[in-house]
Structure formats: structure tokens, C-alpha cells
Amino acid sequence: MAVTLTESAAQRVRTMLAKRGHGLGLRVATKVSGCTGFAYVVDYADQIEDDDQVFESFDIKVMVDAKSLKNIDGMEIDYVKESLLNEGFDFRNPNVKDMCGCGESFSV
């Protein structure tokens, strides 16, 4: 079981944590949302919760709660910058069976 970051994503998290001035790493979760079932939730992680699984990529910790892990196990997170106005995390989740038309939600 694992959720990993590409080197580009790890560098982005490192930069954002440095600007913020504190934090242990990145928290990734899923929530019920959208027309197909789930959406990703990404935030800073300031502590490790009791039900968290902790993964590490390029010296950046990724915390995932046990409930979310079943939806995103094996996922790789990349950070892409396509233009000055279009940049962000790209979720490569092998568990996705379907996505909504706008790409905001998915089903497993």
C-alpha cells in the first residue's frame, strides 16, 4: 500500500511548507462529492492522526487516513505546470473506474 509523489510534486510541497513556515507534510484524503462519488482533499499535515498511514517520497511525508486509503492506494501525485495560468496537482489513481465530465469527482 502506498501513495507517492513525483519529484515535481515533492518540490512543490516543500516550497509551500517553507512559505507556510511549518507542517509535517501533505495530507491527502477523499470525500463523498460530485456526480460520480468521490473527490480528492489535499491539505497541509500538521500532525499524524491515529488512523493515518504515512508514506514518504523525496523526503516529503504524505499522510492518508485509513478510510481514504482504500480509494487511493497506489496513487501517484504529480505537479504539472502547463502555463502561467494552469498548474496544479495531477492525481494518477489506478483505482478510478469512472470520472465526471468536469474531472472533479471519480468512482472506484
Image (cartoon, grey):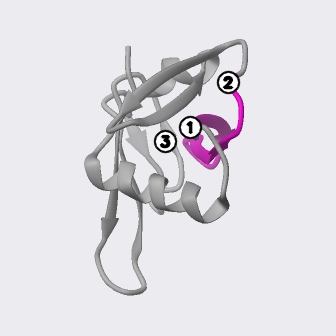
First to last magenta residue range: 28-48
User: Which label was assigned to residue 42?
Assistant: none
Left or right: where 14 falls relative to 68: left
Above or below, 19 against 9 in this view is: below
In front: 49, or 59? 59
Label 1 belongs to which residue?
28
Disc 1 versus disc 3: distance between alpha carbons?
15 Å
Q: Earlier in the sequence, mark 1 or mark 3?
A: 1
Q: Residues within 10 Å of mark 2 (few under 14, many from 20)?
A: some
Label 3 belongs to which residue?
106
Question: Marks 1 and 3: which is nearer the front?
Answer: 1
Amino acid type for the residue under numbered disc 1: Val
In front: 14, or 30? 14
In front: 104, or 69? 69
In front: 64, or 104? 64
Left or right: where 45 falls relative to 98: right
Q: Position of residue 37 (x, y in %)?
A: 59, 37
Secondary structure category for the residue under label 1: strand
For the N terminus, the quadrant is: top left
Q: Earlier in the sequence, mark 3 or mark 2?
A: 2
User: Which label was assigned to residue 48?
Assistant: 2
Q: Could you tell me which residue is drawn at 59 percent across and 65 percent down?
A: 19
Secondary structure category for the residue under label 2: loop
Above or below, 7 against 75 in this view is: below
Q: Position of residue 90 (x, y in %)?
A: 37, 54
Left or right: where 82 falls relative to 47: left
Amino acid type for the residue under numbered disc 3: Phe
Q: Could you tell me which residue is drawn at 27 percent across and 48 percent down?
A: 7
